[in-house]
Image: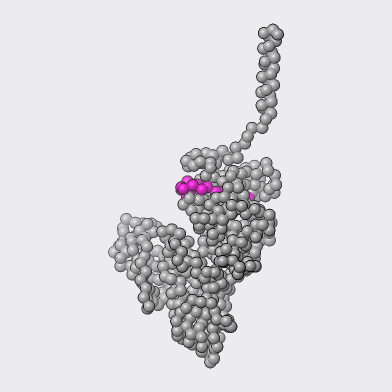
Amino acid sequence: MSRRTAMTAWMALTALLLAGCASVPQPVDPIPTPVREALKAQGLLAESLAFVAFPLEDAQNASARRAWQADLPVRPASTMKVLTGIVALDRLGPNWRGRVELLAGGAVKDGVLDGPLVLRGLAHAAFDWGALSTLLREARDGGLREVRGGLLIDRTHFRPAREDVGLPPFDEAPEFPYNVIPDALLLGGNLLQLQMQSDARQLQARWNPSWSGLTVDASKMQIDPTLRCAQWEEGWKPAAVVADARAVTVRLNGRFPADCRHVQALQLIDRSVLAAQAVRQVWTELGGRLDGKVREAAAPEGSRVLASHQAPPLAEWLRGAMKRSDNPLTRLAFLQLGSVHAQAAQFPSTRAAADAQVRDWLRAHGIADAGLVTDNGSGLSRSERLSPALLAAAIQVALTKPYAPELVAGLPLAGVDGTLSRRLRGTAAEANGRLKTGTLRDAVGLAGTLKDARGRLWVVAAHVNHDQAARKGRPVLDALMAHLAASQ
């Protein structure tokens, strides 16, 4: 073979090989470029991210699916609320209502109850002080004037009746509302409003409502002129609670801004004490008399209902719980799921029955529960886990259900309201994303629905797990949502 012939053959072979390589599809990066850039800017590895997204109308088309580590069990933070909300809307129904009952635990003759007055909680999500007053007034207007057997508080709708007793605090701020562990009564959210007003020298503080026997001592709280009113929490230190047989005094500690007024709901007073003081005071103001001790136990067999107060429908209060990311209300819905499980009594606790209820629902809709770990259903947990694929599949199913409008309306609207009111503004996702947020120190997430530039509805579930996720993860998730919303 001549030199020229060999060179010609070599060039032909090279051209053939290059043509063959050009025809081989190049691998597509599953992580969009803007998201890669956000990860790099935040100093995060791709392994900290897990997500799945697909157009609802094209859910079965693998090429339309965007996913990275979609089957990885992650800490979901408050995106867990979406799964709890979906199962609650399906199994309880959007119109389910909890209630509180007032019962006579004995015979009533000539307006006198020869037994205890029973306050029984049945998962009422909004039983506030006004509702308590209405309930007691109804019994008083019905002719009851004197109770000789004391007050019985019945929280036994859930097992155990009080999960908070003996449970270590989740973090260093157990007195703040997000840390309330609900029970079946949940009177006033187990909270009391503390009104604080300072001048340049001292702080005045009082409870609202001002129930008898409950006082505040603010004499040890120092006024700090360097703190702005919006920074009041920076000077807060855990309060001391001093209780005896007659009164409970809360002694405030730390620093408070000068010339500042702030109202904060706190759980500093034991819920049984709070309920007892409120019932006694309201009943007395209504002209009634209540003698005897206060106890916590189940209502006596044969107790008769004197009055009842219903909560708003589930869809109503669940919407608020999703928008605000309300832990206690979501935990209440989770527990109620357990209480209505067909074999609830066979489980060691209501929470265990609730876990079974969620898994039953997943299996009934063909969704594998691999990697799922439930704790309280709210995401405020060190142990809860789920995969983005599981959560997205649950959302996909929910969007086919009659309650879909109630679910979607409850999710924060990107850049507009709820926990997304200040996020995704100025991006294609603004007002186009209905997304539940999730935030813990080491976990952030977004899950829900998103409209793209073509008007297609996407189902999305995305999470970042990292020891600094709360500080670094949000820009990554926001970049993903903005990218999907702008896609053609």
Counting the numbered discs, the total is 0
The residue drawn where x is 51% and y is 88% is 114
Identify the image quadrant of the N terminus: top right
Q: Quadrant of residue 31?
A: top right
* Image quadrant occupied by the C terminus: top right
Q: Is residue 462 magenta?
A: yes
Q: Is residue 147 magenta?
A: no
Any part of residue 102 in sight: no
In percent of width and height, residue 161 lies at 52, 71
Q: Is residue 415 left or right of residue 451?
A: left
State left or right for residue 353 relative to residue 192.
right
Residue appearing at x 70%, y 47% in the figure = 60
Residue 37 point in image, percent of width and height: 52, 39
Q: Looking at the image, which is closer to me, 269 or 199?
A: 269
On screen, residue 398 above or below 143: above
- The reply to whether residue 5 is in sight is yes
Q: Residue furthest top?
A: 2
Instruction: Please tell me in which quadrant of the rendered image residue 364 appears.
Output: bottom right
User: Image point 49% across, 74% down: which residue?
Assistant: 129
Q: How is the image coloured?
A: one colour
Instruction: From the viewer's side, name the closer residue of 81 and 221.
Output: 81
Near-viewer residue (374 or 133)? 374
- The stretch in magenta equals 459-473
Q: Position of residue 160 (x, y in %)?
A: 52, 69
Residue positioned most to the bottom: 110
Q: Residue at x 56, y 72 (%)?
A: 157
Above or below, 95 relative to 32: below
